[in-house]
Amino acid sequence: MSAFSDPRWSEALSHLPDYLGSHGRVSLAALALGLLLSLPLSILTRHRPWLRGGLLGFASIVQTVPGLALLALFYPLLLVLASLSLRWFGFGFSAFGFLPAMLALALYSMLPVLRNTLTGLANVDGDLLQAAQAVGMTPRQSLFSVELPLAMPVIMAGIRTAAVWVIGTATLSTPIGQTSLGNYIFAGLQTQNWVFVLFGCAAAAALTIIVDQLLALIETGLRRRSRLRIAFGGVGVALLVAATLWPTLATRQSASYTVGAKTFAEQYVLSALITDRLRERGLSATTREGLGSNLVFNALASGDIDLYVDYSGTLWANQFHHTNIPPRQQMLEQLKVELAQQHITLAGELGFENAYALVMPRRRAEALGIHSIADLAAHSGTMSIAGDYEFFSRPEWAAIRNSYGLQFRAERQMQPDFMYAAVASGEVDVIAGYTSDGLIAKYDLVALDDPRHAIPPYDAVLLLSPKREHDTALRDAIAPLIGKIDIAAMREANLRAAGSASPTDVARWLSERISGEKPKQ
Amino acid sequence: MAIGTSDPLPISFMHVSRSFGGNLRPVRAVDDVSLDVANGEFLAIVGASGSGKTTLLRLVNRLIEADSGTITVQGEDVRGVDPISLRRRIGYVFQNGGLFPHMSVAANIGITPRLEGAAERDITAQVNELMALVRLNPAEHGNRLPQELSGGQRQRVGVARALAARPRIVLMDEPFGALDPLTRDALGDDYRALHRRLGLTTVMITHDMTEAILLADRIAVMRDGRLVAVGTPSEVSATSDAYVSELLGTPRRQAERLSLLFAGTGVT
């Protein structure tokens, strides 16, 4: 069996038109906007050293912000702007996906274009500027028919750098809801699907290299005044843009339902399950995967996604900032009320709980006589703990730490799927794992008891966006899922997803299992 | 020489000064120069590097503005004339051609009429006529880029471009300085013939004293921004000023040494 007969390759390939098209669209729009801003700005400021310095300084600072952070910052910024616009002008806009990604990437593209345009214009031979004046050109004519054409090769080199940066960085726009080639990479990382990761990297690299080479052809064409090269490069870029955009533009059916998913395997499986269910009912649906915890809730509240699965304890502590921990049913009832105030519907519990739990190897726990978090407290000073990217900044962690007096030697953030292997191999001593994760059994780990109930219950619940409040078709479609997924089923599904099966395959398996059919192995 | 009678003077400088280098240590590039250029005259400005020749020339079409004094072109004070239209009616030839490297020879020559909004057909006809005038072949050279031409050919293009707007006045900044002696000689003679045929008024800067004496009707000598002598070659040669006679004597001394050398080796 060759490595390419793996069915994941063909699954990856089936996503390519959508991912590549979205990637191309957002990169192209960002680059166009970046050029539209940078070119006039550099022309206007070229004879004003103060403004020029300020502008270059600003662009340099933007450049030092990591791409992921820049993209993430634009989401809350636009959210505020959108609500202000709604209040003042009576219309809002979606702060999710395309717009924040395009704006952040456009900012990212500005530095090389600004710098090269200014350098290119400053390096035009002074004698030629004199000649342009002497033949009777106005400053404007001199700019457009002498200075810009002569600076063009240098400007083009800047555009080329910007294009490469934008296409590369666009892979990071997946977490703020913009579909891109990064979807392969993020999904692949979460579900340990290395075929996806490789495929995504290769596709992004290929796109970057092709664009770079075509723009290089135009650049040398301008430098050597070869119309042939410019024409070839230009036609190549046009063909590439058409090839990237055509499949999605031609077959663009806007799906009526968007199912959100956070950044871990369970969420990928559940969103695939829900999407399948909606499609079976004849409703068109699509998924938006790899969204951050807070972002996904805001996206639901503002109607950018229609539904997703969240966990009661997460909503309780993170969205509504409660510090008390009521009993399970009471928490659910109160959440329903509070969500309803925002017109968000809690459609029901799926039937399992995915709680945070402090997890360590069974043998080590037994050797040290640790059964509960209270027992762990005495050892924590010599131990290290690992959690996912958000755990240590979540209120639950503060609650656990305070009620048991935990003081770990070190706290490390990790990719969730690597944590279990890390704790099993002794790389870290304890992890903040998830109770629904199948890897706990696989690595012979144990989840420690929480006698003081510092960790809230985390029932998986289906949330519907305000605009779906009265959508009976949607409710009917998802009703068969409510209360049907027990913890054993979810654990096994998660274990399968962590193996070689894709979330789509696991979702199909899970669907068969909960509908009572005998799942095929 | 057809010096005009009632026509206003093409160019006149009256007590013109211009300094560079800020207020702390200003350098007077042009220092109280008064000079009239007559209709149809061919005036050569000579002087060492840094004597203010180029500044004086550029004051005429306002590439440089005067600090004080008055410059008139065809009777009008240049300060009252729009610099763009002023430049479009005065031809200007640069030392190294000053051709736009991204434009074809034909596009370079036709630039000023195009800026004036002339019809493309008229521009093409005029470019062909001008190329013939400076002995270039429109079919052969018109579509080439400047860097594909020889130095002499580029300078011919520069002259054609300066003449494209049918100016009465042509300013030349060491137009033939970078050329080999044979080319320089041929181009100088050709231009002198054009000057006469088209009834131009020409002001030419040159380093080459022989060129000045052979081509110009009058020679103006500059030193440290001041005009130290003006007159026909023979008038200027007869001056009592030591610097001027040293400068003007150079071609004669060279000619004498050459003839001695040639006599000694039997070359006649």
Image (spheres, rainbow, N blue to C red):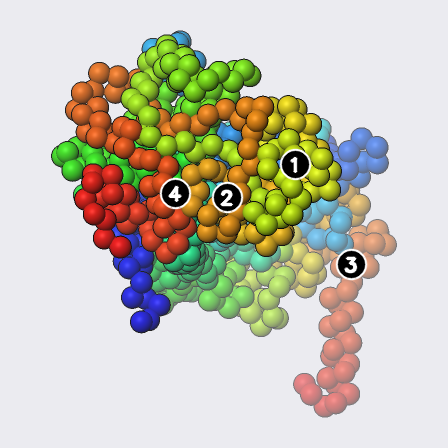
Pair 4/1: label in front? 1
Establish whether labels 4 and 1 are both on one chain: yes
Q: Which residue is mark 4?
A: A491
Establish whether labels 1 and 3 are both on one chain: no
Pointer 1 chain: A
Q: Which residue is mark 3?
A: B247
Q: Is residue A1 visible in this depiction of the protein?
A: yes
Pair 3/4: label in front? 4
* Amino acid at dot 4: Arg
Q: Residue furthest bottom?
A: B266
Residue A163 falls left or right of residue A512:
right
Q: Nearer the viewer, residue A274 or A79?
A: A274
Q: Quadrant of residue A11?
A: bottom left
Residue A118 falls left or right of residue A289:
right
Q: CA gap, disc 1 to disc 3? A: 102 Å
- How many other residues sit within 10 Å of disc 2, few (<14), some (14-19) or many (≥20)? many
- How many other residues sit within 10 Å of disc 4, few (<14), some (14-19) or many (≥20)? many
Q: Position of residue B74 (x, y in %)?
A: 53, 34
Q: Which residue is mark 2?
A: A416
Decide: is B96 above or below A322.
Answer: below
* Amino acid at dot 3: Leu
Q: Quadrant of residue A404?
A: top right
Q: Residue furthest left?
A: A282
Q: Position of residue A276 (x, y in %)?
A: 22, 39
- How many other residues sit within 10 Å of disc 1, few (<14), some (14-19) or many (≥20)? many
Q: CA gap, disc 4 to disc 1? A: 25 Å
Establish whether labels 2 and 4 are both on one chain: yes
Pointers 2 and 1 in contact (C-beta within 8 Å): no
Q: Which residue is mark 1?
A: A376
Establish whether labels 2 and 3 are both on one chain: no
Q: Is residue A106 visible in this depiction of the protein?
A: no
Decide: is B37 above or below B258.
Answer: above
